[in-house]
Image: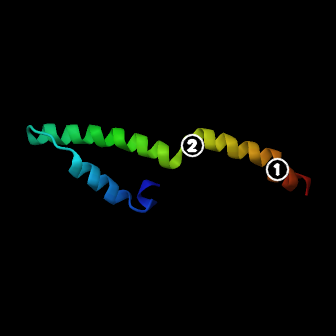
């Protein structure tokens, strides 16, 4: 899903390049991965929202509107 969002790869690339860490290669990798993980969590929430809430809302709308009309048909 993330890879289908326009500009996602460029966004992750810019985040990666923006993280300045000193230390061994393995330390830099782990530190950058942890920071990217946190940024992805925030980004995901902002872009996609809370999927469980969205799903519940969609089901409520379905049951109160379109779904009722389809069942009556």
Left or right side of 49 for 67: right
**Image quarter hosting the C terminus:** bottom right
Q: Residue furthest right?
A: 72
Q: Which class describes the residues within 10 Å of circle 2: few (<14), some (14-19), or many (20+)? A: few
Q: Which mark is residue 65?
A: 1
Left or right side of 31 for 46: right
Q: Residue furthest left?
A: 24
Quarter of the image where one finds residue 38: top left
Indicate the secondary structure of the residue bearing disc 2. Answer: helix
Distance Cα–Cα, label 2 vs label 1:
21 Å
Q: Residue at x 24, y 49 (%)?
A: 16
Quarter of the image where one finds residue 25: top left
Q: Which class describes the residues within 10 Å of circle 1: few (<14), some (14-19), or many (20+)? A: few
Q: Position of residue 6 (x, y in %)?
A: 43, 62
Q: Residue at x 38, y 57 (%)?
A: 8
Q: Position of residue 59 (x, y in %)?
A: 72, 44
Q: Which residue is mark 2?
A: 51
Q: Eyeballing the image, is 62 above or below 35?
A: below
Q: Are marks 2 and 1 in contact (CB under 8 Å)?
A: no
Q: Residue at x 31, y 53 (%)?
A: 12
Indicate the secondary structure of the residue bearing disc 1. Answer: loop
Which of the marked residues, 2 or 1, is nearer the chain's N terminus?
2
Q: How many marks?
A: 2
Q: Position of residue 14 (x, y in %)?
A: 27, 54
Left or right side of 16 for 1: right
Q: Position of residue 50 (x, y in %)?
A: 55, 40
Q: Which mark is residue 45?
A: none
Left or right side of 64 for 7: left
| Chosen colour scheme | rainbow
Q: Residue at x 85, y 49 (%)?
A: 68
């Amino acid at each position: 899903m993330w890879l289908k969002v326009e500009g996602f790869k460029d966004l992750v690339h810019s985040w990666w390049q923006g993280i300045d860490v000193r230390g061994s290669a393995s330390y830099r990798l782990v530190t950058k991965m942890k920071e990217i993980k946190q940024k992805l969590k925030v980004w995901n929430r902002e872009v996609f929202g809370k999927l469980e809430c969205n799903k519940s809302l969609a089901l409520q709308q379905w049951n109160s509107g379109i779904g009722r009309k389809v069942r009556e048909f």
